[in-house]
Amino acid sequence: MENNTKIVTLERHINEMERQHPGASGHFSNILRDLSLAIKIIWREVSKAGLVNILGAAGTQNVSGDLVKKLDVFADETIYKAMDHGGHLCAMASEEHESIIEIPDQYPKGKYVLLYDPLDGSGNIDANVSIGTIFSIYRRISQNGKGTIDDLLQPGYKQIAAGYVVFGSSTMLVYTSGDGVHGFTLDPSIGEFLLSHENIKMPKRGKIYSVNEGNYKWWGTGVKKYIKYLQEEDKASSRPYSGRYIGSLVADFHRTLLYGGIYLYPGDSRNQNGKLRLMYENNPLAYICEQAGGRAINGEKRILDVFPTELHQRTPLFIGSEEDVNDCERFLKEP
């Protein structure tokens, strides 16, 4: 029986996309290939985290006498070791490290930089809630040699690729290189990411808002009014919206990408810049969101237009369906 279904692995998809750009060197494809290997290794550990806690919790020694490491530290080291030697990067930065991560002297230096959040939402591991990895790739601006801090501190609109992985009931990798957003689901039986969501488009408007309402009393007036607006009944505009908040940014954003709506992490009277980091979370997700037809702002401007001044800079985030973010922006600008 003839089967016309095309099986597309992540590597095949990347190669096919690269063929559309005749001048491509192959370095970018290799970066994503190495990164996908690191993600499979992280998935292996995340998927057995419950068993590890039963058989030997963090802080104890395993049968080899090695100290069992926490998953976020393991994820950080795994990505670094998968990416440091390929000759494609000149520097990296991680949410787990205070400063630039240099490529070891013995390895060649490439023309790209990688920024990553190795395990977003890791505080939810013990509750078996979905967690994830977020990454962002830029072309270096220095000429050669070791990468510099300026290579890493670039505005989000200069990203050449961004993506995230959700470790949930299934493991899914979503990425964009400026040609749409594509999702791949890991088939554990063959160890390959297979194309499952081609050219994802975010709905223009959704029916879900996602925010930590425990912070309500510290929000500004505009945010409070907007949330109340979403909760009011108005059948003509599909209100009230449903509230959904997982507390794991990758999981909350992934739902928003597929179903539409809006995710908010505003600043408040305790911290005007909020909690989320521009370089490791907001920029990559904003790039993906815009490529899928959505919007991402910090309340005053487009996230991708914010010029970073430090690696761990924080900004408020309002991200999701275009019409929902437009409505939110209107409330934020009211006096």
Image (cartoon, helix red, strand yellow):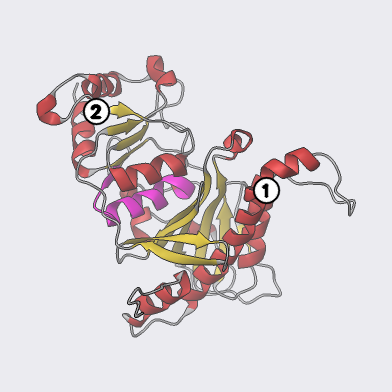
Q: Is residue 320 above or below residue 293?
A: above
Q: Is residue 264 above or below residue 221?
A: below
Cα separation, mark 1 vs mark 2, equals 43 Å
Label 1 SS:
loop
| Residue drawn 22% across the image and 46% down it | 203
Say which residue label 2 marks.
Answer: 332
Label 2 SS:
helix
Q: Amino acid at mark 2?
A: Leu
Q: Position of residue 261 (x, y in %)?
A: 27, 38
> Which residues are the magenta region?
279-296
Q: Residue furthest bottom?
A: 22
Q: In the picture provided, is 300 more to the left or to the right than 26?
A: left
Residue 151 in sight in this render? no
Q: Is residue 139 above or below residue 223?
A: below
Q: Provide the major secondary structure of the magenta segment.
A: helix
Q: Position of residue 185 (x, y in %)?
A: 46, 59
Q: Is residue 293 magenta?
A: yes
Task: Report which quarter residue 85 is drawn in.
Answer: bottom right
Q: Which of the image's four quarters has the C terminus?
A: top left
Q: Amino acid at mark 1?
A: Lys
